[in-house]
Amino acid sequence: MTAMPERPFNLDGSRVFVAGHRGMVGAAVARRLGREGCEILTAGRNELDLRRQDAVEAWLQRARPDVVVLAAATVGGILANDSRPAEFLYDNLAIETAVVHGAHLAGVKKLLFLGSTCIYPRLAPQPMKEEHLLTGPLEPTNQWYAVAKIAGLKLCEAYRRQYGCDFISAMPTNLYGPGDTYDARASHVIPALILKAHRAKLARADSFEVWGTGAPKREFLHVDDLADALVHLLVHYSAEETVNIGTGEEVSIKQLAELVAKTVGFAGSVAFDATKPDGSPRKLADCAKLARLGWRSGIDLKSGLKSAYDWFLAHSEKAGPLREGGLTS
């Protein structure tokens, strides 16, 4: 059953702390909240280390936000997860425990925590429903991140049950858009593909290489769509269960790579290295609960990729050196 509050949560005039405002998701949320009449609170890494419980508690006590959107996390693709497991587990556990507990102590009225559809079981039924979480083994290539994020979801549930906190959680699908990370060692699939296709075009190469077979299917959501959905949930949702956020459409990595090449204007071919890992074979979110709450995606993949590439071109000096890495998230 989809739970809606007796009355919508009023964001107008609220003080909203966007944790992770410099990241792709946090920046998009801050942009979207700018239309809601809120006061947006932020804290950069030089001001606040979100992994430090004492520092987070002290900052929240001073700032006194009414709402917290926890968009801060250590994230990355297959290679980043595989080569930095301790960071992915420790950083994410530390961030979520510090912020969730600190929000409770500071009397925050509402908190929204972000999980990810990549934390569902590797072979979860498709499309994945919220109740499929913890029903099977995790995808080994991102288990460290998954364990931490699952703990965060359960932490929000626990604070609702024990303290009556209005803490909710959402499960976005694979994200892309303005502000993404363009480094194949740390990137998710779309920015890594854009970077590879762009540099192959500049080099007039015959092809560019992608890890895996190209067979896995993925669902992709533009980050501005996500931000709009998150604001919708803040206003219209209050319950223990998490909510999937996605488009309901999927594309194979091969199809995606070819679409990215076309968007970038690369006329060569895409080569797949089948000796490298694919990750989960399929990840499609069932977004029926979100639809019942009155929200659906509005940005299609073709136009979304164009906006992502336009942003990349405008900020290409920030894209680090191309390094080989896993692309499937």
Image (tube, grey):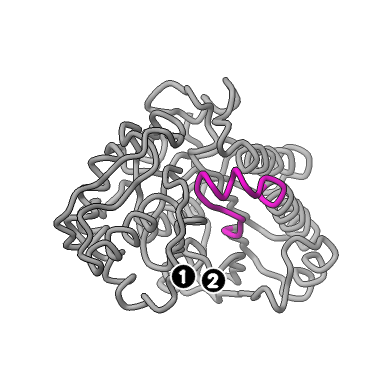
Q: Secondary structure at mark 1?
A: loop
The residue depicted at 41 percent of the width and 54 percent of the height is 226
**Residue at the left extreme of this rendering:** 267
Quick one: label 2, few (<14), some, or many (20+) residues within 10 Å?
some
Q: Which residue is mark 2?
A: 22
Residue in view at x 47 percent, y 23 percent: 124
> Where is mark 1, residue-wise?
320
Badge nearest the viewer, 1 or 2: 1
Residue under the point 53% across and 57% down: 9
* Residue ID at (77%, 59%): 102
Q: Which mark is residue 7?
A: none
Q: Who is closer to the viewer here, 72 or 309?
A: 309
Left or right side of 189 for 300:
left
Instruction: Classify 10 Å Cα crowding around label 1: few (below 14), some (14-19), many (20 and above).
Output: few
Q: Is residue 5 visible?
A: no
Looking at the image, which is closer to me, 156 or 270?
270
Q: Which residues are magenta?
A: 71-88
Residue type indicated by callout 2: Arg
Q: Residue furthest right?
A: 54
Q: Measured from the top left, where is residue 309 in percent x and y? A: 28, 66
**Is 239 rendered above or below residue 101?**
above
Q: Position of residue 198 (x, y in %)?
A: 27, 64
First in sequence: mark 1 vs mark 2: 2
**Relative to 229, 149 lies left or right:** right
Task: Name the one closer to the observer, 49 or 323.
Answer: 323
In the rendered view, tell whether residue 323 sits above or below residue 49: above
CA separation, marks 1 and 2? 17 Å
Q: Residue 30, how many percent across, how many down?
A: 48, 70
Q: Quadrant of residue 302?
A: bottom left
